Amino acid sequence: MKFYNSIGPNPRMVRFFMAEKGIDIPRVEVDLMKAENRGAAYTAKNPQGQTPSLELDDGRHLAEITAICEYLEELHPTPSLIGTSPVERAETRMWTRRIDQQIVEPLANGFRFSEGLPIFKDRMQCEPEAAPGLKRMAQARLAWLEKQMDGKTWICGNRFSMADILLYAFQDFGSSVGQPLNPDFKNLTAWFARVKDRPAAKA
């Protein structure tokens, strides 16, 4: 297999996931700043023109970070980062979907449509007027999640999971582009510090 890597929170999420599992896959670096991911050579592998992607041994390519992680979990089930039972897997997927739709997407597009506009304006449809509202939306859902974290170590309770990795990768990115974690969110601030202390967070 080959892992098509780049800068940004999406590849980082998968690298973190792989590091937690001790998986080492050869990497091919894709230069996003030079728009290499939008060139014909790369879009032939991933028509979305996004990173990361995973090239399988038979030449097929998987994209979308949660799909890649689900595939790797099936190949390397231990340690489990999605779940060892139907209810655990459903719980992880529930939280991952909530975080992806309600926090990650508005946070990322809030950046793309504002601070990141010079990079993205010629690569995708951008709506600069939507950026402030998207950022507020992400913060509102973080405020909701803050309350859900009462008494919990990780997003799925006592289980560190893909949901934690997803949120950490994007919130750490958000903090570097003008969308920091509100220090009033005591539960999430403590959670963030716990994730940051994991060796795999440096991947």
Image (cartoon, rainbow, N blue to C red):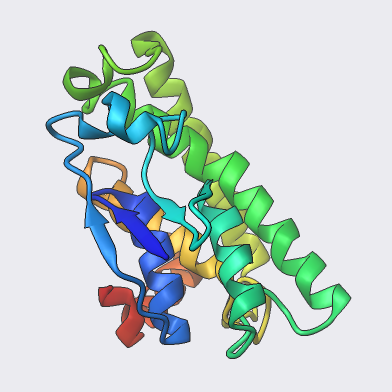
Residue located farthest toward the bottom when viewing the structure as drawn: 78
- Residue at left offset 65%, top offset 81%: 151
Depth check: give the residue in front, 99 or 49.
Answer: 49
Q: Nearer the viewer, residue 137 or 63?
A: 63
Residue that extends furthest to the right in the rendered view of this protein:
86
Q: Is residue 182 visible?
A: no
Q: Position of residue 174 (x, y in %)?
A: 32, 47
The percent coordinates of residue 192 (x first, y second) are 40, 71
Q: Is residue 98 above or below residue 117?
A: below
- Residue at image coords 25%, 75%: 202
Residue 4 on image: x %, y %: 32, 53
Is 124 positioned to the left or the right of 191 in the image? left
- Residue plotted at (43% across, 15% down): 130
Out of 95 and 121, give the one closest to the viewer.
121
- The correct choice, above or below, for 181 with respect to 114 in the image is below
Q: Quadrant of residue 129?
A: top left
Q: Quadrant of residue 127?
A: top left
Q: Quadrant of the C terminus?
A: bottom left
Q: Is residue 112 left or right of residue 20?
A: left
Image point 36% across, 61% down: which residue?
2
Name the spot of residue 193 as percent of width and height, x first.
35, 77
Total number of numbered discs in the rendering: 0
Q: Quadrant of residue 3?
A: bottom left
